[in-house]
Image (cartoon, coloured by chain):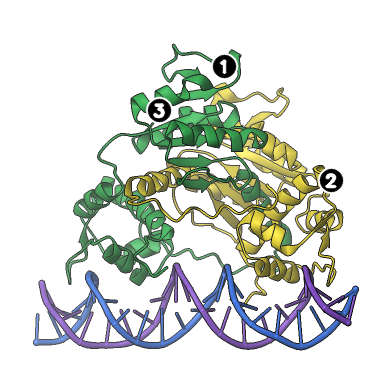
Chain colours: A yellow, B green, C purple, D blue
Amino acid sequence: MPDVVTNKNAVIRLSKYKNVLRRMHSRGVVRVYSSNLGNAVGVKASQVRKDFSFFKITGNKKGGYIVDDLLSMIHSILGKNSLQKAIIIGCGNIGSALMNYREFQRERITIVAGFDTDEGKIDPARDIPILPMSELKPFVREHRVKVGILAVPESAAQDVLDTMLAAGVEGILNFAPLRLVPSSPCVINNVNLAVEIENLFYFVNHREYDPLPTASDEDYG
Amino acid sequence: MPDVVTNKNAVIRLSKYKNVLRRMHSRGVVRVYSSNLGNAVGVKASQVRKDFSFFKITGNKKGGYIVDDLLSMIHSILGKNSLQKAIIIGCGNIGSALMNYREFQRERITIVAGFDTDEGKIDPARDIPILPMSELKPFVREHRVKVGILAVPESAAQDVLDTMLAAGVEGILNFAPLRLVPSSPCVINNVNLAVEIENLFYFVNHREYDPLPTASDEDYG
DNA sequence: TAGATTGTTAATCGATTAACAATC
DNA sequence: TAGATTGTTAATCGATTAACAATC
């Protein structure tokens, strides 16, 4: 794909620029250059400018970018001006941790309900209700939820995905450690924490000499 | 880097092959071909063979690979034959969810202790003790822990990283949403859940027509 | 103005895939 | 054997970085 087909990495970086810009904003920084953002995120300045160019964000030939303006353009691109509603399917360890996750709240990502097959966990009276799976479809319809977090055991994941898609969910954050096969077109982002830490162990156990001194030039933390 | 400098993606794929092979093993599958593994993981067969070649894993010119043999070779490469000990710093939402995370247990990744600054959370008597930060250094020394999960709020993350490195931790799984600057050489893997779901919202909100029917040929789930 | 920074095009780099000889 | 699969080298593809004209 050329780069019309929106590159996932570019969108990920856009989120990171946003995080850096928020910290700058709260420190009262007014102007920022592509080199500052590049340093803070770990890419070259030309990458930053290329990303901006892709999202039609422009600055000033001499004066860089105005932090506040940049921030509001990125907010708008990422849909940060409205509430972003999601549901969680599977209220076990991570599922319930994410129901009250501060980083989500800070991003206006709001968990509107949890779902579980375990009778004992059902509690529609809670602040964030936990409902039985039978309520999934009507709930998604009524609240127009598009995104769901899939946090059930591996053995149940594929079936639950099918149910979610049938209910109308369009995007899935999948924590189950397998490649899901969607029964209808959707967006799936996988987070595999075990693989992530396994990878860490591999590199810790295989490092010989001190590896390259892990790029550390930062302009704005 | 050519590809002597061990590519992160190859190690990640190795973990995924392992997961697929375990499922095959439990289903009694004896032989597997690179094409099966490629399909299951979402890469081409030549990628699988290239990965194996990199890790010096060989098969049979005609008969593919023996599942059990392959599995034990990968287990050995990934260090799965011994317990993998880790600590968690910050016992909030995700921190405490990961203390008893089943996917970790299944991988023989063992959380040996948690650490927190909050007096109320300290409890050295628990199954997995939760200790004050002052215990970090002696604990890491005594138990020879190399890997730590950093699950504290953004504002504390950099300081806590410095403390962890000073204590002797060599690898960090970082959940804080910023780029950390290590004060000594170490391995850092970042997991940014808010960015991950933000990305999902972006693509869900920007999809026009049905995107490419999300590769779905699977040989072995 | 001179110096510095953007926006964009060209070059580089690295990772994935294709191709194919070797061989079981 | 003939057909199929590995292991490896060559080709492709895409993403990142360098370079530079435009310009404030």
Asked if the residue at tag 2 contacts the one at tag 1, i.e. Cβ–Cβ closer than 8 Å, the answer is: no
Q: Which one is nearer the viewer's eye here, A31 or A19?
A: A31
Spatial CA distance of label 3 from label 1 is: 20 Å
Residue A117 in sight from this viewpoint: no
Numbered mark located on residue B140 in the image: 3
Chain of the residue under the numbered disc 1 shown in the image:
B
- Distance from the alpha carbon under mark 3 to that under mark 2: 39 Å
Residue A41 position in % (x across, y down)? 64, 55
Q: Nearer the viewer, residue A37 or B126?
A: A37
Classify mark 1: residues with Cα within 10 Å, few (<14), some (14-19) or many (20+).
some
For residue B121, the mark is 1
Where is B167 relative to A65, above or below? above
**Is disc 3 placed on a helix, strand or loop?**
helix
Which amino acid type corresponds to the residue marked 2 in the rendered image? Gly
Q: Position of residue A51 (x, y in %)?
A: 70, 67
Q: Which residue lies most toward the top here?
A: B125
Look at mark 2 in the image and give the residue it sits on. A28
